[in-house]
Amino acid sequence: KKVLFSGMQATGNLTIGNYLGALKNWVNIGDEYECFFSVVDLHSITVRQDPATLRKRARELLTLYIAAGLDAEKNCIYYQSHVSAHAELSWILNCFTYMGELNRMTQFKDKSAKNADNINSGLFTYPVLMAADILLYQTDVVPVGIDQMQHLEIARDIGTRFNSIYGDVFTIPEIYMGKVGRKIMSLQEPSKKMSKSDENPNGSIYLTDEPDAIIRKFKRAVTDSGSDVIYSEDKPGIKNLIDIYCAITGKETKEVEKEFDGKGYGDFKLAVGETVMDCLKPIQDKQKELLKDKQYIDGVIKNNAEKANYFATKTLRKVQRKVGFPDRV
Ligand code: ATP
Ligand code: MG
């Protein structure tokens, strides 16, 4: 089987952006692959986190993976920090990455502008750690949102560079993106991507939002002048809502335009809200139920960390040998 790797940071409650851009695709295509789904807590601390909150969110996120439909027996669902090979390979790959390459990363620019008081070197080398995450498992495919495209390219570049020096050590991964939902925008600022670390909660629909909050946020979503439900670059607000609606229902944009022909924005927003609500309800219920089952979740954490460690260490040992570290005796 080919290998799939992906992960999310425990930096906040997941948004429907994370769900439609990544998690939903994991569930859709995962069966065809040997899958590794990580809660990337090492990445999370590139931005300051409250320790108790981070720990709690990490557990909720891991549980949410399962609640969203990933089978914890078939898939390797684990915490990045439980597999030290991520940090070790990341160090080695740092020595094969150029400052100039990292300087071009737009996520670093965005995040350092948002966290001007804490522009740490972890934030700068974030893409190298991400490359290590992916390359460790000899990954073939990485399903992520389009915002991660640049990071995936640098991971490919680093892997290719290493291979060109030392021979075929790493599989060079491909990106996977769904047809719709690659980039869900903020409901308040449709020019900005929806992010779980956004400070304005009205811009995001969280996977944990109650039905009334979902409906309220969609009702208040910033839309454009005019009143026709039309998919157009000139109407970024409505376009985003149509994207959300299509990503969940599987409908085409043309169908949606027809469905809401002659109806106003109000009707459409309500319909999107209800669709999202119905989609999230079963996931929320399942997550609540799973969070109560401490023994089961603990078992998943322990077993999968062992499995991930086994595969990751295999690649790490190979890399260590290639670069010239002494053999273990
Ligand atoms: P943060 O603001 O802390 O970076 P985030 O919402 O960007 O949080 P990540 O953990 O960085 O979430 O990314 C997890 C996954 O979700 C990645 O695959 C990313 O590409 C995807 N993703 C994030 N935001 C969106 C979005 N608005 N639309 C589609 N996919 C998204
Ligand atoms: Mg992000």
Image (tube, rainbow, N blue to C red):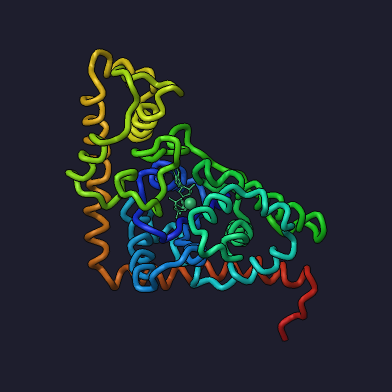
Q: Quadrant of residue 277?
A: top left
**Closest to the observer: 224 or 288?**
224
Name the residue at 32% across, 29% down.
Answer: 223
Q: Quadrant of residue 216?
A: top left
x and y percentages locating residue 209 in the rendered image: 24, 49
Question: From this viewpoint, is residue 1 visible?
Answer: no
**Residue that sits furthest to the right in the current view:** 165
The answer to whether 131 appears left or right of 213 in the picture is right
Name the residue at 23% across, 67% down.
Answer: 292
**Closest to the observer: 204 or 251?**
204
The answer to whether 324 appears left or right of 298 in the picture is right
Q: Quadrant of residue 71?
A: bottom left
Question: From this viewpoint, is residue 179 visible?
Answer: yes
Compared with 20, 303 (above or below) is: below
x and y percentages locating residue 159 in the rendered image: 71, 55
The answer to whether 56 appears left or right of 122 in the picture is left
Compared with 231, 1 (above or below) is: below
x and y percentages locating residue 221 in the rendered image: 29, 35
Name the residue at 71% across, 50% down.
Answer: 157
**Closest to the observer: 162 or 186?**
186
**Residue that sits furthest to the left in the current view:** 212
| Quadrant that contains the C terminus | bottom right
x and y percentages locating residue 319 in the rendered image: 72, 67
**Residue that sits furthest to the front in the current view:** 117
Compared with 159, 51 (above or below) is: below
